[in-house]
Amino acid sequence: MSFKEKINPARLPQHIAVIMDGNGRWAKQKGKLRVFGHQNGVLAVRDTVEAAAELGIKFLTLYAFSTENWNRPKFEVNALMQLLISTIRKETKTLTDNDIRLQAIGDIDSLPTGCKRELKEAIDLTSGNKRMTLVLALSYSSKWEILNAVKRIAGEVAEKRISISDIDESLFNSFLCTANFPDPELLIRTSGEQRISNFLLWQIAYSELYFTNKLWPDFRREDLYEAILDYQSRERRFGKTSEQIVS
Ligand code: IPE
Ligand code: IPE
Ligand code: MG
C-alpha cells in the first residue's frame, strides 16, 4: 500500500505549516549558487500545494521568508524577491484552477513595491476560492507578530475600547496575523534542522512537530503523505492522560 492509501481521510490535519529549509545546501551539493536552490524549491512548493489540496487539507502555511532573512547578502534577498514576483505571477492561474485561495502573513508592508502589488493582485483574484487556503509567511517572524499584537492591544486599552479583563486567548488570537486560521495541528521542517526559527510560536503550542532530512527542493507529495501518516500515528493528549483520550 502506498503512503497515500494508508492515510485516514477522517483524521486529516486541517492546517499544516511548513518550514521550507535547505535550498542553499541543496544547491551547494550540486556545485551551484544558493539561488539555484531557491528556484528549484518552487517545484517542491507546487507539488506540495497540489497534493495538500487534493487530500482535503484546508490550510497550508509555508514559511517562505523570515524577518531574519533580510540579513542575508543583498544579492540573495533580491533574487528571492524576484522569484516571489515571478512565481506568484505564474502560479495564480494554477491556484484558481485548483480552487485555492492565497493569503499572506507577516510584515507585508516591508516587501518591495512590485512584490506587494503582485501579492495583492493574486490575493484578490483568488479570494473566492474555497478548497484550500494557502498562506505565505513573508517577512514574517513570530516575535514581530506577537509584539505587534501587544502594541495594538495596548492601544485599544489606552483608548478604553477594551479592558484588561477582556484579554484572553481568543482576544489575543484575534490580534495575530493568523486570526482567521485555525492553529496548525502539524508542523513540518525539512533539511534536518530541529528548530522553529521564529515561526508561529503561539500557534504551535500544541502542534505535532515533524522533522525530515530531505532538503526542501527534493520534497515531494510522497514526503507530505509520509508526514501526515506519522502525524496520524501519534496520540494527542493536550495535557490529559492516555486513558482519558482512549475513552
Ligand atoms: C530555505 O532555504 C529558504 C529560505 C530561508 C528563504 P535556505 O536558503 O535557508 O537553505 P539552507 O538552510 O541555507 O540550506
Ligand atoms: C527559516 O529558515 C526561514 C524560512 C524557511 C523562510 P532559515 O534557514 O532562515 O533558518 P535558520 O536561520 O537556519 O534557523
Ligand atoms: Mg536555512
Image: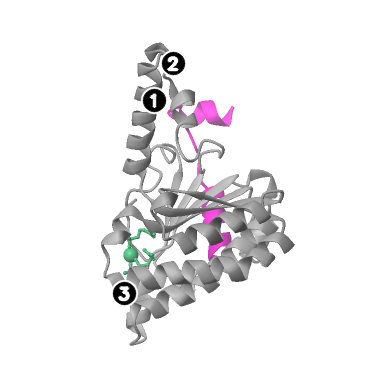
Mark 1–mark 2 Cα distance, whole angstroms, equals: 8 Å
Q: Is mark 1 on a helix, strand or loop?
A: helix
Mark 3–mark 2 Cα distance, whole angstroms, equals: 45 Å
> Is residue 171 one of those drawn in magenta?
no
Q: In the rendered structure, are the residues bearing label 1 and label 2 in contact, judged by CB atoms less than 8 Å apart?
A: yes
Q: Position of residue 172 (x, y in %)?
A: 43, 27
| Residue at the disc numbered 1 | 153
Q: Position of residue 24 (x, y in %)?
A: 34, 74
Give the residue at x 45% y 71%: 82
Residue 162's label in the rendered image is 2
Q: In the rendered structure, are the residues bearing label 3 and label 2 in contact, judged by CB atoms less than 8 Å apart?
A: no
Residue 123 position (above or below residue 149): below
Split into quadrants, the picture shows ligand 1 in the one at bottom left
Q: In the rendered structure, are the residues bearing label 1 and label 3 in contact, judged by CB atoms less than 8 Å apart?
A: no
**As rendered, which of 247 and 78 lies closer to the eye?**
78
Residue 168's label in the rendered image is none
Q: Position of residue 71 (x, y in %)?
A: 26, 61
Q: What amino acid type is highlighted by mark number 2? A: Ile
Relative placement, left or right, of 94 versus 134 is right
Which badge, 3 or 2, is on the more N-terminal residue?
A: 3
Give the residue at x 45% y 36%: 176
User: How crowded is the residue under tag 3: few (<14 C-alpha within 10 Å), some, or many (20+)?
Assistant: few
User: How crowded is the residue under tag 2: few (<14 C-alpha within 10 Å), some, or many (20+)?
Assistant: some
| Residue at the disc numbered 3 | 75
